[in-house]
Amino acid sequence: MLGAVWNLRQSLRAQLLAWVVLTLVGAICFNLYDSYQTADQTAKLVSDRTLLSSARVIAEAVRVDEGGNVEADIPPAALEMFDTGYGDQVFYQVITAWGNLVSGFPDLPLPSVERTGQDVTFRNSTVRALTLNHPVVGLPDDGDISVTVAITHNSQYALRRRLWLDDFTKQFILVLLAGVVTIIGLQRGLAPALRLRDAVRARGRERLDPLSPGMVQTEFQPLVRALNDHMERVQNQMAAQRRFVSNAAHQLRTPLALMSTQASVAARETDEARRDEALQALRSSTRHMSRLASQLLTLSRAEPGSRRPRSDTIDLAAAARDIVAAHAEQALQRDIDIGLEVSGPVPVEGDGTMLREMLVNLVDNSIRYTRRGGQVTVSVTREETLAVLDVEDNGPGIPADERGQVFERFYRVLGTEGDGSGLGLSIVREVVDGAGGTVALAEADGGGLVVSVRLPVAAQRRA
């Protein structure tokens, strides 16, 4: 039962039909109430007109005889006009202006207003009564007589009920017709959306070409455009993944082939010195292979959607201090002077692991591409709401026309020394984008390269 209700709530057709029907039912309920009041007023008006006609017929039959006595011969027509087949009882009273009863029921109560029907209580029941004052020739000063006619409510209620039921029948038929027309309209109106559904289902796994917005109504066209945008992003991501896999396979093939050759040489070599040289080269290739695999894994983790977003708060200055200390031995082996400049804690918010990987790649790249005897300086400062990380070296630098390309995967500037894989700056860009920051390259004073990263400080990101 609950499942059926939930399915109805999830159905657009059912929701639209429910809103239309509820609106119609609400309007019809108001109309039925209004029609009931109108029918009641109409039935009272008809009853009052009949009472007035009967009172007038009775009044015109009153006369004064030769002795000055008032007589009233009640015409049968005055009472038969109430014979509508509903068993109503009729009461009447004729009295003079001085209160003498001429004919009728002496205890019949009089309405408070002349010529206006009113409900009064007579003999423990409610009746509709009307009083008419009528002059009679022959009475002193042409005096008036008062004629009161009353009738039970059977015919009045029957007329009200008939009028209201007629209106109710028309309103009910109107709701049914409106519901049928609404269902047909919804079926036709949702047909383009169903065609869109069928078109999406009928596509193969590799078909990501855009759909035509003209196949649906104007209201659904933004949905089609959103689908097209999503498919375009998926297509671009798939293309990027294919390029990445192709490039990774190419990059791994060369080291693997080299390692296989070096292992074969070491196995065949009888001279101990040459065998040690081959083994040393094999160890170097193994380290390069390990670093390449590690960077590929880091780049995969840095891509959007590859892992659950994290929101760590880390001190960028402290993280830079740890990483510079960890790379001090590597810098000493290459006779490179590595330094750190910090002015105090600089908190940033993001994935702490990936932010540290960004620092590792920046420092490692600078050490790898800086010539022996060079300098690498890492500085962390704060500029209002931004954390600024600068990694500067006096290496060969990057030509201005290639600075936009070095962020691409496996791209390396021709003629540069070092055994890098071309993934370091790609990892940096992915991490910085994920943290909501920017990264830029510039030429250092006296030559070399400055990589400048700007990240929102933790308080600013939360705001």
Image (tube, rainbow, N blue to C red):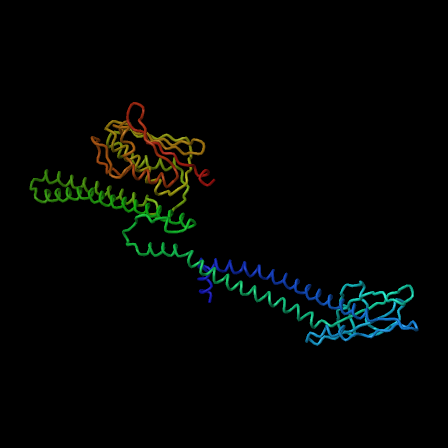
Depth check: give the residue in front, 334 or 172.
172
Q: Position of residue 66 (x, y in %)?
A: 91, 73
State the residue at coordinates (11%, 42%): 266
Q: Position of residue 387 (x, y in %)?
A: 41, 34
Point out the residue furthest to the left here.
270
Point out the residue furthest to the front here.
66
Quadrant in the picture for residue 90: bottom right
Give the number of callouts: 0
In the visual, does 177 lie left or right of 132?
A: left
Depth check: give the residue in front, 245 or 71.
71
Depth check: give the residue in front, 340 or 382.
382
Q: Position of residue 342 (x, y in %)?
A: 39, 31
Point out the residue furthest to the top here.
446
Q: Is residue 308 visible?
A: no
Q: Position of residue 459 (x, y in %)?
A: 46, 38
Quadrant in the picture for residue 162: bottom right
In the visual, does 322 lie left or right of 251?
A: right
Q: Is residue 351 visible?
A: yes
Q: Is residue 175 above or below residue 79?
A: above
State the residue at coordinates (37%, 35%): 438
